Image: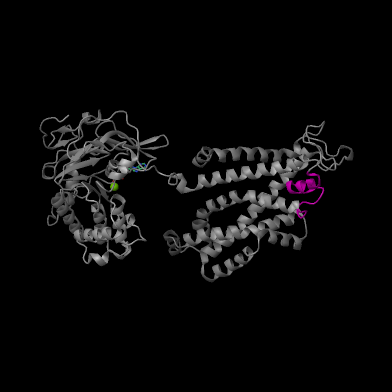
Amino acid sequence: MSFLRRLSRNRLGLLGLIVLFVVVLLALVTPILPLQDPNATETADRFLRPFSEGHLLGTDHLGRDLLSRLLWGTRLSLTVGFAAAVIAATIGAAIGIVAGYFGGTTDNVIMRGVDMLMAFPYILLALAIVAALGPGLLNALIAVAAVNVPFFARNIRGITVGLAHKEWVDAARLSGMGHARIILSEILPNVVPVIVIAMSTTVGWMILETAGLSFLGLGSQPPTADLGSMLGEARAALISAPHTSVVPGLMILIVVMSINLLGDGVRDALDPRLRSGALTRPRPATMVSRKSVPKGEGRGILALQDLETQFHVGRRVYRAVGGVSLHVEPGECLGIIGESGSGKSVTALSVMSLVASPPGVITGGAVRYRDRDLVGMRYLDLRHLRGDRIAYIFQDPLATLHPLYRVGDQLTEAIRVHHRVSGREAWDRAIDLLRQVRIPNAAERANSYPHEMSGGMRQRVGIAMALANDPDVIIADEPTTALDVTVQAQVLSILDDLRRDRGLAIVFITHDFGVVAQLCDRVAVMYAGKIVEQGPTHVVLNDPAHPYTRLLIQSVPELGQGRRDLVSISGLPPPVEDLPPGCAFAPRCPKCEPDCTVAPIPMLGSDHHAARCIHPETPLREAAE
Ligand code: ADP
Ligand code: MG
């Protein structure tokens, strides 16, 4: 269903589908149409022009009705082309799957045979096959199918080789399945889309090849008409009676064009990467569509004011971030904590408009950096700030560092994007940065590739890169989640020193209260795209006001305190495309009261400590809103 919808969104593909449908329909009903006999000659009516009495498209050199010949010829050409495509795809795919699945000698023998077929120009090969078998439509079909087998075999073999070593195939093998069963149930379903795509893009080609052979007199034999032979017979009268060539020529054009357009559409609709929108190039900055801009200056060096970021996928709206307000001062570390999927990363990426668009849209709020609003800022200005004034550290440095460049080069590049310095200078600075993040033997390590370093080392390179231009703010999105505990402690202490020495403001995203306690001055707890509690770390940790915060803290094991029972929060966070009207945590909250589920809950309390709860665990002083 969604395949058809995607196909119909591709206008050219849809056009191809409609045209091809009409042509195929005509070909199907040709026998029951009131047409003249396509082979009945009438020498008196030779070369009648189109729209003549009784002959809508005119007649050919033997006085045969062109319309009738055209429809019968199209029927024949389509049949032969499709049949050749199906035969070539079946045989080619079988060869490819066997070669790719078994590999080794089998693969070598089969593929060298295929290579030998491919070594001949295919038209020559087709001619040779027809010459050997003798002219005739069936032989032309065999020839066209045969020359296309290698194309399918190579294509499918490549895909199969990749699949044959996947874990699920190994698992099937370990569970005792035989080869035939694995091929049919594990491999084949995964290559069928590729076969369909390859077929849909080659059918047109095969119709052309068949027409070519018929044109040369090697395909359909007189008096039977196919598009190629009609063209061949009309050749002699090309100048004197051009319509005899134009009619079959146009039909070939229409058929092949529509098949190719449809084939491209099918390919796009079937390709899973296109399906998720990955190949629609994301914009350089997140789309912004907000009705109003919050007034007032932001506090601190970076302030988010009621920031809202959504994902618009089709008709569905995912409210990933639903009105987040927070700020950081220079030299301060703000922690953002929350379950996976609570919107922490989207909040972080929204700051610099890095949320991929489409589907991301910033639908409200502002991001104030030094009194400038980063939301909706000109792309060029934004680019100047990215990585220079506000820098990011991501979770997986192996994914963010380029595998083919030395880390020194990557640091150098980060510097030279924003500053006009010589390569030498930048390199020296890169080594200095590596030293600052306590990489031993920095001058030599700068020559390493990312894969030559350990995880902790790589993350330190990530930090060095964020520091490269001496930013004001660093946004660290779970930078220590992939590291083990000792390395995590080292990385945290580096970050802690940096903010004290340089007055860096750090927004530190994590799902680990231990890390928050160690590093952060203040903490904001996120749930379902909203901040549910915010305050100084020691206050929030010791006297949490929101039941969610308390449960989160109680679910963290404490070293040496093995006797306390760990709490697990039952249920799951609500889906962000369908949030409840009141408190988003209410369905899971042990203290939920009827009034919790009626209307959205505002942040209550003071600037110092606030929570989005009307029945807090500890009383909150004075209302903030
Ligand atoms: P986390 O707090 O674990 O970092 P994220 O910020 O990555 O969570 O995600 C927040 C929410 O946004 C999740 O519910 C996620 O499903 C949704 N989301 C993220 N990216 C997309 C996207 N491209 N399309 C739709 N929803 C998305
Ligand atoms: Mg995340």
Image side of residue 182 versus residue 344, left or right: right
Quadrant where the C terminus is found in the figure? top left
- Residue 24 in the image: x percent, y percent? 67, 41
Front-most of residues 410 and 220: 410
- Residue 56 in the image: x percent, y percent? 78, 33
Q: Is residue 224 visible?
A: no
Image side of residue 319 versus residue 122, left or right: left
Kindly give the residue lying farthest to the right in the view shown: 44
- Residue 409 in the image: x percent, y percent? 31, 60
Front-most of residues 33 and 290: 290
Quadrant of the rendered image containing residue 50: top right
226 is within the stretch colored magenta: yes
198 is within the stretch colored magenta: no
- Residue 294 in the image: x percent, y percent? 25, 30
Number of marks: 0
Which residue does the image show at 58% across and 60% down from the upper left?
153
Quadrant of the rendered image containing residue 488: bottom left
- Where 550 falls versus 166 (above or below)? above
Which residue does the image show at 61% across and 55% down from the upper left?
89
Q: Which residues are magenta?
A: 216-238
Q: Is residue 284 visible?
A: yes
Kindly give the residue lying farthest to the bottom in the view shown: 105
Image side of residue 207 versus residue 392, left or right: right
